[in-house]
Image (cartoon, rainbow, N blue to C red):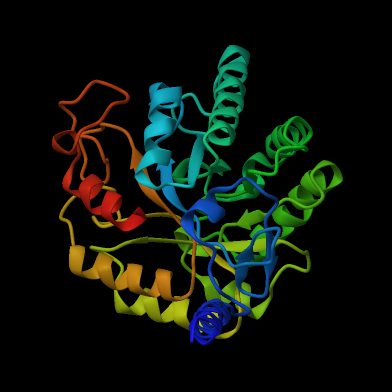
């Protein structure tokens, strides 16, 4: 009788293990957070064991404005909360941007990037190095020369860092076409590939990284490429969700490198209902995401209240409505 029970128990264990397998099963949080080389397979981001990985994390605000959050205890807490990725937003043009500040500023920005990559690796998190173009330089061709210089440095510096992902143009805007973005990408991607041949690279899309349909119609012919989608839930609803759903049907690999539950200004009213609809789609399709933003700026997209001056050791009472909502999402 005991042998029969033993056989039955072994059968149940085998059945459970078999039922958990699948070609696109998502890696558990602990495994997804392990720093291993990622790659793109169809519309999925996968780890070295070929399991689909959904990265969940946060973007810094511009690291010229709020560099103080790139610190050991803060990154440790982000990891403890459940984040497995941090995006380092380095503005190319605005306030002390890489292309507009002096040599000392450029050096300081590189040091902050180095520190962020090192801390992310220490706490088993991935990191996006974000070339953060916006309104004043919405066409990435504007500072293509400087971008080539920066990504030459970054890809050489982090060629042996499997946790690094490159985002080469944050939000192309002001009428920038997919043709312009493509011209830029064809100059920058080979620069990165020369040194970091297998790294994942994210390319922004037209109209503040919303027009995924342009990338669907004419995707870049490189491996390990993903395309950025940005949304702000109080502004962007069913229409943009339909754009995403349509792109996914065409197997376009999408990474939401920036979003929040407020309006598109990064401030204003909060729409949790729309935000929850977005999260349902992202989780269903294992789409990775970074919330905007890690700072105490007095706006509704910040996760830390403006009255809170500490840069780590955050309690629930220190978080904004957005911060509390995001923390629940990444658990």
Q: Identify the residue at the far front of this view.
A: 1
- Residue at (51% x, 37% y) in the render: 88
Q: Nearer the viewer, residue 34 or 218?
A: 34
**In this picture, is 91 found above or below 223?**
above
In this orientation, does residue 303 appear? yes
211 displayed left or right of 185: left
**In this picture, is 180 found above or below 8?**
above
Q: Nearer the viewer, residue 17 or 264?
A: 17
- Residue at (71% x, 58% y) in the render: 48
- Residue at (48% x, 47% y) in the render: 84
The mark tally for this picture is: 0
Tell me where residue 134 appears, x and y as whole percent. 47, 45
- Residue at (86% x, 45% y) in the render: 194
**In this picture, is 234 found above or below 17?**
above
Which quadrant, please, contains the C terminus? Answer: bottom left
Tell me where residue 225 appears, x and y as whole percent. 68, 62
């Amino acid at each position: 009788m005991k042998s029969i029970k033993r056989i039955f128990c072994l059968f149940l264990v085998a059945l459970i293990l078999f039922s958990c397998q699948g070609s696109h099963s998502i890696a558990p949080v602990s495994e997804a957070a392990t720093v291993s080389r990622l790659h793109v397979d169809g519309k999925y981001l996968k780890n070295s064991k070929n399991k689909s990985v959904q990265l969940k994390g946060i973007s810094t605000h511009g690291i010229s404005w709020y560099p103080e959050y790139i610190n050991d205890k803060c990154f440790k807490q982000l990891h403890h909360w459940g984040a497995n990725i941090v995006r380092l937003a380095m503005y190319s043009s605005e306030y002390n941007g890489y292309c507009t500040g002096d040599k000392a500023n450029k050096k300081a920005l590189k040091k902050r990037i180095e520190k962020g990559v090192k801390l992310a690796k220490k706490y088993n998190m991935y990191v996006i190095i974000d070339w953060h173009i916006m309104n004043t330089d919405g066409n990435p061709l504007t500072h293509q020369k400087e971008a080539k210089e920066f990504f030459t440095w970054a890809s050489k510096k982090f060629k042996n860092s499997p946790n690094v992902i490159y985002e080469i143009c944050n939000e192309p805007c002001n009428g920038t076409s997919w043709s312009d973005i493509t011209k830029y990408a064809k100059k920058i991607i080979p620069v990165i590939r020369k040194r970091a041949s297998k790294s994942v690279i994210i390319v922004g899309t037209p109209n503040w990284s919303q027009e995924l349909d342009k990338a669907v119609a004419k995707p870049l012919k490189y491996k390990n490429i993903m395309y950025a989608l940005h949304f702000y839930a109080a502004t962007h609803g069913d229409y943009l969700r339909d754009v995403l759903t349509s792109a996914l049907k065409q197997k376009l690999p999408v990474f939401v490198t920036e979003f929040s539950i407020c309006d598109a200004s990064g401030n204003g009213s909060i729409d949790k209902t729309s935000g929850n609809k977005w999260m349902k789609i992202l989780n269903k399709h294992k789409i990775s995401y970074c919330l905007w933003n890690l700072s105490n700026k007095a706006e509704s997209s910040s996760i830390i209240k403006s009255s809170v001056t500490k840069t780590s050791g955050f309690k629930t009472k220190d978080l904004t409505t957005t911060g509390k909502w995001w923390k629940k999402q990444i658990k």
